[in-house]
Amino acid sequence: MKACKIPPKKIEILNQMNLYTSDDLLSYYPFRYEQLELKPYEEWQVKDKVVFEARCITYPKSIRFKGSRTMTKFQVENEDDVFDITLFNRPWVNKMELGQVLTIIGKYEGNRKITAIQYNFKPLCEQLGIQPVYPLKYGLTQKNVQDIMRRCFENSVHDIQNDVPTKYREQYRLLDKKVAYYKIHFPENIQDVTLAIRTLKYEEFLKFHLAIQLIRKQNEKVEYKQGKSFNFDDVFVLANHLPFPLTKDQVKAVNDLLCDLQSDRVMYRLIQGDVGCGKTVVAALGMVACCYAGKQCALLAPTEILAKQHYLSLKDLLRSTSLKIEVLYSALPSSKKKEILEDLKLGKIDILVGTHSLIQPDVEFKDLGFVVADEQHRFGVEQRRKLLDKGDKVDFLLMSATPIPRTLANTLYGDMDITTIETMPAGRKEVKTILIQENSFRSVLKDIVELLNQGRQIYVVCSAIEESENFVARNVLEIYENLQKQFEGIACVGVLHGKMSSEEKEEVMNEFKKNHIQILVSTTVIEVGINVVNATCMIIYDAHRFGLSQLHQLRGRVQRGSHQGVCYLLTDTKEPESLERLNVLVKSNNGFEISFEDLRLRGPGDILGTRQSGLPAFLLGNLVEDTKIIETTKHDVQEILDNSTNSENEQLIKKVLLINENTLSTMD
Ligand code: ADP
Ligand code: MG
């Protein structure tokens, strides 16, 4: 990028935005376009965005307000009409000369008055048409980005290569990649944009499917094992002793697992189901089967809190068996750790629950047969691999609480078998969700006092821990202090966040469980694994900063018992799209619908997380809406793989493999 004559300061900013190569930069696409159209004065309406050429007839005069704000006024003449122009905060316009012709872009205020957004001395005819609008960061202006883009394009145009093989470019009449880049950044009209997007989207999806297929191929290499032998009935007898009957889908899921364990193919399965649908007990029964076959199991959880929670519920669920269950995490006293590691090696432990501590080299199993990873999107492929390598041909189960519709799941998780739990345990209530367009406690105060009077407890969630310069969200420490003052003598307020030590966290959690703390202010550390039945209310600050699936998981914390759970989403965003997004949660309690919306609006990153981070990103494509292109590219990828010796195909495959490797190696 250096050779593009972009100033070093700007390069620094681009690097901050993760843009390093000219290819990175050229794939930094406009998120919308603006049309500049010439309209005769007679057709102007108040509030219209207008553009016109005129002659300056008075010298600009600036007025200074408090601080550094200024307002500058001058008059211009266009044919017979005189217009009053107002400009804010641009006191340096004085250099304008009488009689000089300029182009003004601004908002029409009626009565021949215009608030100018921009003015310049370039001829109007050069500026009409369509203008790209880029997402801006770190003080860059639209003009900066447009300028950088032009330099970059001119400089690298000869190096831009077509990744899509000629066959498909001809078949679908796609543009040459150079032309596509040109048209998306410097379009002459909207057709240019449409054509460019069509081409670039095709390429995105083609690479995406190719990456999935390549990952799948890698996984298929370790396919066969010796089937585990156990008795199905023994497992289902245990299921009958649970305090509740399994739902229809749970039974089916258990059955899927048992068949996989027994089969001579290595299990590679995903169980997806909404928060609270009861995935843990399904995994538990699978683990029991594996233990009955004489092998050990590991259950991997993303946080210590969740690991401990799983450990306790497993002990409870399996108390009628003689299986030995232990939990391992980094904060465990070293003597206890040592004991666990020794027992594990001797085969005295049947099920080991734990955080990423399980991946450490000193953790050795006698005979590991089955690994379960909960909240799968939080683990990298590498981490999982390391755990699976602790045994031979280990069966592997992933659990996800962001379920997506079947056809989409088949696309996204093309390399796995999928079990979907749709039915919820009987009698589950829905969390009542209320959107409040104000980022403050004031509007919920009355309700909270009422709940406290009824003896209930409350979570307050913030997206940040402490105040920070470039982050404008409300933070845990500030809110904690405020609430302490506000509720002095009424309720005890506690605080919980990721920077606290393990003991501190545990202490606070215990106090909350015992109801010594009534209001718990925290970050999203409470997202998974916290189970306090009496906590029936959650208040989430800056709700627009979270993904919908994450908010849905969070609110799942307050519907654990028979009291009606309530969740308040606080936000001061004025963006209609953000509000619309949050309203999905108000209207729906269905995890499938919610993650579908997330996928439609934000792309797969949030849902797939690190698991699929080896996949190319979607910049233009939309997994929910572009169904036709998805089908087409899926088919074409098969053809490409079948003809992998064709030189163009070979090159494309190599390129996609490279994306894969690069992201994987930088993941941990
Ligand atoms: P998730 O799928 O979100 O991991 P859990 O496995 O934590 O859900 O289950 C949530 C709660 O529902 C647990 O308290 C569990 O004991 C309970 N549960 C699971 N299955 C059933 C069922 N079939 N009937 C009633 N309660 C159930
Ligand atoms: Mg769970």
Image: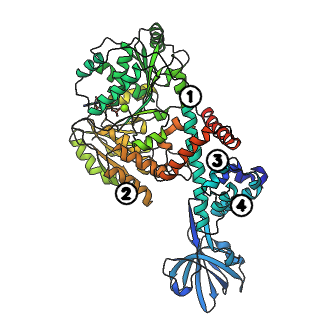
**Which quadrant holds residue 327?**
top left
User: What's under tag 2, amino acid-wise?
Assistant: Gln
* Pick the front one: 622 or 305: 622
User: What's under tag 3, amino acid-wise?
Assistant: Gln
* Residue annotated with mark 3: 16
Specify whether 289 is left or right of 67: left
Mark 3: which secondary structure?
helix
Task: Give the mark nearest the N terminus, 3 or 4.
Answer: 3
- How far apart are the alpha carbons under marks 1 and 2? 42 Å
Mark 3, mark 4: which one is toward the viewer?
4
Specify whether 96 is left or right of 290: right
Q: Is residue 574 visible?
A: no
Task: Give the mark nearest the N terminus, 1 or 2.
Answer: 1
Q: Are marks 2 and 3 in contact (CB under 8 Å)?
A: no
* Residue annotated with mark 1: 382
Q: Which disc, if any, is residue 437? A: 2
Q: Quarter of the picture for ligand 2?
A: top left
Q: Is residue 642 visible?
A: yes
Residue extending furthest toward the bottom: 80
What residue do we see at 20% from left, 41% from top? 454
Mark 2: which secondary structure?
loop
Task: Give the mark nearest the N terminus, 2 or 4.
Answer: 4
- Confirm if mark 1 falls within 8 A of ligand 2: no
Mark 2, mark 4: which one is toward the viewer?
4
Q: How crowded is mark 2: few (under 14 residues within 10 Å), some or many (20 or more)?
A: some
Q: Which disc, if any, is residue 150? A: 4
Q: Is residue 563 above or below residue 278?
A: below
Image position, residue 137 (x, y; %): 60, 54
Q: Is residue 66 above or below residue 360?
A: below
